[in-house]
Image (tube, grey):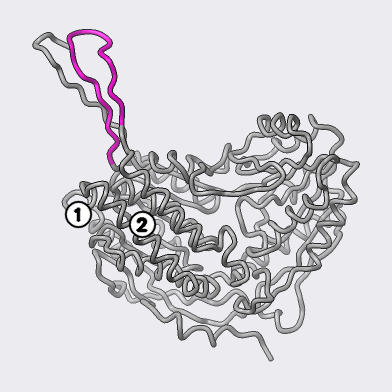
Amino acid sequence: MALTVRQHLDAAALKDGLLLVDGQWRQARASRTWTHHHPATGEAIGDFAVADADDVDDAIRAARRAFDEGPWPSTRAGERSRLLRRYADLLRENADDLRARQALDNSVPLSFGTVYAGSVDVAADVFDHHAGWIDKAGGETLPPYQGGDHLAMTFREPVGVVAAVLPWNAPFLLFAQKLAPALAAGCTVVLKPSEYATFSVLRMVELLLEAGIPDGVVNVVTGPGDPTGEALITHPQVDKVSFTGSREVGRRIVEASAGTMKRVSLELGGKSPAIVFPDADVGLAGMTAMGMVTLGLSGQACVAHTRALVHRDAYDEFVGAAELIAGAVTYGDPFDPGVLSSPLINQRQLDRVLGFIDKGQEEGARLVTGGGRPDGDLSAGHFVQPTVFADVDNAMTIARQEIFGPVLTVVPFTDEDEAVRMANDSEYGLGAGVYTSDVRRAFRVAKRIRTGTVGINGFQVEPHLPFGGYKQSGLGREGGRSAFEAYTELKTVLLPLTDELM
């Protein structure tokens, strides 16, 4: 019998086809809709509104009024903090429901729903963390430098109206990483979820309304990049754009921001290296890297360590461990607890990944395992077998481009300097891993790699840590104090204490 997810739809019925503007759910003006096809089965399982430029304008003007005239920016720190913590509690209470909706969105299996990107608890922790910054948004008092006696003070104020544009691969985490610091700082938001992950985000917004967020503080417009996203990022009343996604869209946002000098935060992907030395637990390194590439999101994660740089003395052991993990991955109905990984999100991405696999073989890489599609009940979905390429040269296409699929490339190196040189020979600089039992080598290599985050013998993203990339992996950081401050402007105020000129 063919795989189906239709039996899971009834419990997920919610504001299908509606936008949220100024606290009210409403139809799109032109009544256009987007049909979501489930990536594991190809079934049409939901219709969502396509907001046009007029809908987006309504939402932004509602956010503008809520910021300029509403209570949220001036709400006392204690009240704002309590609301965000109340919301974090609601997320945890509704975790099972939210994970089910995510499985309908992007087919991330429920078995992965308590792990990092698929975890509602992590999203709740992000809101708790930023709730703690609200009463600490202080500035400085500075001594006079010249002139008469005076006070010089700095204050942090909310940046204004924020356009938050989410990807489809980790809706819980990215929703939290953008909205939590924005709301904590006192901003108002117009949110655009990915058209491939709308079920879960709309439910998260419903819970935010239940927590008591004032009307107009959070507005939602759904639809694809054209027309919805383009209207949002180019609107003159948007003060800041926060985006996670492709480099191409990131470049468009930078261009669009120039006219009104919008503030911009961008996380644009990576080709993260895992550097494995022979004194490491090589088997663990191989299982960890391949696990990041195959389990849960099937390599559709910006920070996945898809480029393994392995010392020649550890090479065969590493490849063997990666192949072992590849053979243990299971696919199918995301609601089946025995399923460990997801399909690719759509046909375009499936074609793209298969194209990279063909390119790798054309350029001379050795296909160790995978490289094709599963048969049988899975043939209607966008599944690709976990794939390992060995004997890869760092100049090959599969070692340089972000594939965003379950493909691990294994590149040999001879010494530390060569490993660092190859790690840095990339347009990206998001994450990296260093596997060794030599603590001095671990820190030495971590300092030399030009990436935003380096994990030593493992990798973790936590709410209080800044996360972002060097080079073409983006601008700015999400997580921690730096994320909170990215949604503020710094103001200097001078107060003379005498009649003498300052």
- Residue 140 colored in magenta in the image: yes
Left or right of residue 368, residue 489 in this image: left
Q: Position of residue 370 (x, y in %)?
A: 81, 65
**Local SS, label 1:** helix
Instruction: Classify the position of the C terminus by image quarter.
Output: top left
Residue 207's x, y, as percent?
Answer: 36, 68
Is 59 part of what is drawn in magenta? no
Q: Quadrant of residue 440?
A: top right
In-image side of 422 versus 243 (left or right):
right
In this view, the residue farthest toward the left is 499
Say which element carries label 2.
Answer: helix
Q: Amino acid at mark 1?
A: Arg
Of badges 1 and 2, nearer the viewer stands 2
Where is mark 1, residue-wise? Answer: 65
Residue placed most toward the observer, 315 or 59: 315
Amino acid of disc 2: Arg
Q: Closer to the camera, 267 or 255?
A: 267
Q: Look at 47% across and 58% down and name the residue there.
A: 123
Using residue 108 as the reference point, say whether residue 189 is left or right of it.
left
Q: Position of residue 11 (x, y in %)?
A: 45, 83
Q: Quadrant of the N terminus?
A: bottom right
Highlighted range, magenta:
139-157
The picture quadrant where one finds residue 425 is top right
Disc 1 from disc 2: Cα separation: 25 Å
- Crowding at mark 1 (Cα within 10 Å: few <14, some 14-19, many 20+): some
Tell me residue 344's x, y (percent). Answer: 64, 67
Residue located 73% across and 54% down the image: 288
Q: Which mark is residue 201?
A: none
Circles 1 and 2: CB atoms closer than 8 Å: no
Q: Against 469, is 249 above or below?
A: below
**Residue located beneath label 2 in the image:** 85
State which tag comes first along the sequence, 1 or 2: 1
